Image (cartoon, rainbow, N blue to C red):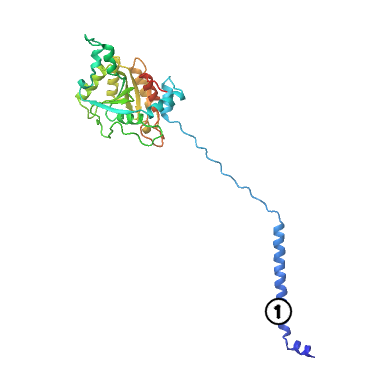
């Protein structure tokens, strides 16, 4: 009796709808779970990743290297170049003096060895004064002589060059003959530039040095690669040829050159055409940029100086 009363007090309609909602909710969850299971049971298809091909960077061979091998028959071994670079990198460089006139660069040994003096032991006197072979750098004003000297005496991988020879963007900055002693093995001589902002006195000073200096073994004529040889460069070459003075040619500022057609044409026409003996030709850059990432050509130039001065390297 009591159960009937309780049951009759409940809202039958509400209970049935509630039950239906519960049942439908349960069915929905069940179907969702089943569909999830089905999806999880399906094998997953892996889409292969497309790898982008690696861009292989090819090193561009600098113009200076190609040109050196083309115009010079003498190639140096890697072993010799390494020894040479070791010598220059560790060299003791001393600025000795500047010569303002021809008297200042005249060495008393020049006349002493040719004219014996009575009562003087010549061999002993020779030992007291050490004569060093000399290499001179010639070129027009602002051809890069001082910059080349600094780069020549700086390590290959060093970002900036040593400030051994004073440089300037102003043409004609070097006024005198400047002598640099390299480890007491030889001297490098920086000469005043000819042409713009130069004087007749400087020209005569260099001329007398070239004609009379017995220690001078080789002169290098520096020519900016982009400007090519001018009439002053050709006049200097003719002067050296006529007086039997040995010289080679260095094309500087190769970092400014993008093609070599005009340069090669001038080499054949002016340099080889005006010389009885073909000079060695070097191609260097003292400044680095995207065309010349390093200072190229100096290892070959160093080897040339070592061979000319007969310097022993280990």
* Farthest right residue in view: 1
Question: 244 or 95, which is in the foreground?
Answer: 95
User: Residue 104 appears in which quarter of the rendering?
Assistant: top left
Residue at the spot of label 1: 18
Q: Quadrant of residue 120?
A: top left
> Position of 204 compared to 73: left or right?
left
What x and y, as percent, mark residue 157?
Answer: 41, 34
Residue 288 quadrant: top left
The structure residue drawn at horizontal position 69% and vertical position 65%, both measured from the top left corner, is 32
Tell me residue 81's x, y (percent): 43, 25
Q: Determine if residue 221 is in view.
A: yes
Residue at image location 72% in from the left, 70% down from the top = 27
- Give the residue drawn at x 72%, y 60%: 38
**Image height of 39 relative to 88, above or below:** below
**Residue 192 in view here:** no
Q: Is residue 222 above or below residue 43?
A: above
Q: Quadrant of the C terminus?
A: top left
The spot of residue 62 in percent (x, y) is 43, 31
Q: Label 1 crowding class (10 Å Cα cut-off): few <14, some 14-19, many 20+?
A: few
- Horizontal side of 198 relative to 162 (left or right) equals left
Mark 1, secondary structure of its residue = helix
- Of residues 302 and 9, the one nearer the viewer is 302
Q: How many marks?
A: 1
What is the quadrant of the N terminus in the image? bottom right
Q: Position of residue 252 (x, y in %)?
A: 35, 29
Eyeballing the image, is 26 above or below 68? below
């Amino acid at each position: 009796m009591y159960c009937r009363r309780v049951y009759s007090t409940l809202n039958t309609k509400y209970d049935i709808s509630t039950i239906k909602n519960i049942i439908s909710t349960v069915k929905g969850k069940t179907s969702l779970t089943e569909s999830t299971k089905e999806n999880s049971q399906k094998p997953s298809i892996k889409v292969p990743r497309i790898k982008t091909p690696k861009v292989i960077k090819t090193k561009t061979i600098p113009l200076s290297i190609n040109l050196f091998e083309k115009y010079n028959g003498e190639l140096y071994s890697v072993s010799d170049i390494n020894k040479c670079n070791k010598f220059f990198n560790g060299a003791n460089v001393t600025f000795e003096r500047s010569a303002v006139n021809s008297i200042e660069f005249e060495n008393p040994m020049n006349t002493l060895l040719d004219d014996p003096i009575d009562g003087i032991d010549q061999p002993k006197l020779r030992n007291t004064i050490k004569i060093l072979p000399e290499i001179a750098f010639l070129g027009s004003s602002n051809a890069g002589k001082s910059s080349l000297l600094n780069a020549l005496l700086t390590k290959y991988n060093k970002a900036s060059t040593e400030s051994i020879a004073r440089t300037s963007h102003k043409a004609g900055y070097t006024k005198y003959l400047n002598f640099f002693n390299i480890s007491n093995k030889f001297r490098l001589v920086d000469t005043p530039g000819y042409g713009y902002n130069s004087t007749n006195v400087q020209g005569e000073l260099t001329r007398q040095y070239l004609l009379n200096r017995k220690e001078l073994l080789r002169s290098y004529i520096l020519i900016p690669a982009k400007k090519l040889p001018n009439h002053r460069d050709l006049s200097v070459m003719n002067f050296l040829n006529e007086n039997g003075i040995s010289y080679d040619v260095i094309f500087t500022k190769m970092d400014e050159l993008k093609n070599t057609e005009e340069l090669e044409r001038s080499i054949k026409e002016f340099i080889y055409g005006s010389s009885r003996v073909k000079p060695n030709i070097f191609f260097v850059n003292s400044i680095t940029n995207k065309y010349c990432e390093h200072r190229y050509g100096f290892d070959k130039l160093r080897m040339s100086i070592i061979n000319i001065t007969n310097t022993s390297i280990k």
